[in-house]
Image (spheres, rainbow, N blue to C red):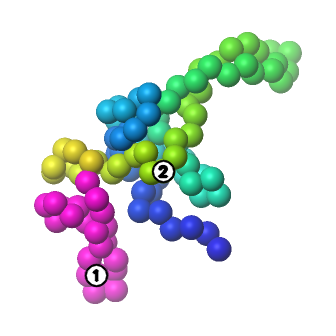
Amino acid sequence: MQKKFKIKKNDNVEVLAGKDKGKRGSVVRIIPKKDKVIVSGVNIVKKAMKRRSQQDQGGIVEVEAPLHISNVGVVCKKCGRPVKIGYKIDGDKKLRVCRKCGETL
């Protein structure tokens, strides 16, 4: 069974804890088995990459490392800050909404 997260791919999020606290970016990938997300431009680490082919360049590369999902918060477009997510049922659709202003996320 796959876990359900309130954070989805391409959401704008802000880092709430850790070395990159306060930085914002969009979610590139969600890793449900480990409860982690990869955010663009955040949590950059240096990684040694092995040369894969003759033309490929090896060496030290900067990549985005995963963050725990509890350390990021979804940013509301209207409020402009991290908010909690609520749900509204509209007919047969379930919509994600901002708890502060009611804006659809």
- Name the side, left or right, on which 34 lies relative to 20: right
Figure quadrant of the C terminus: bottom left
Nearer to me, 92 or 60: 60
> Could you tell which of marks 2 and 1 lies nearer the N-terminus?
2
- Name the side, left or right, on which 73 lies relative to 78: right
Q: Is residue 40 above or below residue 78?
A: above
Q: Residue furthest front?
A: 18
Whether the magenta-drawn stretch holds residue 84 is answered as: yes
Q: Quadrant of residue 41?
A: top left
- Name the side, left or right, on which 48 lies relative to 6: right
Q: Quadrant of residue 102?
A: bottom left
Instruction: Tell me the kind of residue under disc 2.
Output: Ile
Label 1, residues with CA under 10 Å away: few <14, some 14-19, many ≥20: few
User: Can I make out residue 97 in this image?
Assistant: yes
Which residues, given as a range, are shown in magenta? Answer: 83-105
Whether the magenta-drawn stretch holds residue 1 is answered as: no
User: Which residue bears the numbered disc 1?
Assistant: 89
Q: Secondary structure at mark 2?
A: helix
Label 2, residues with CA under 10 Å away: few <14, some 14-19, many ≥20: some
**Residue at left 82%, top 19%?**
51
User: Which residue bears the numbered disc 2?
Assistant: 69
**Residue at left 73%, top 19%?**
48
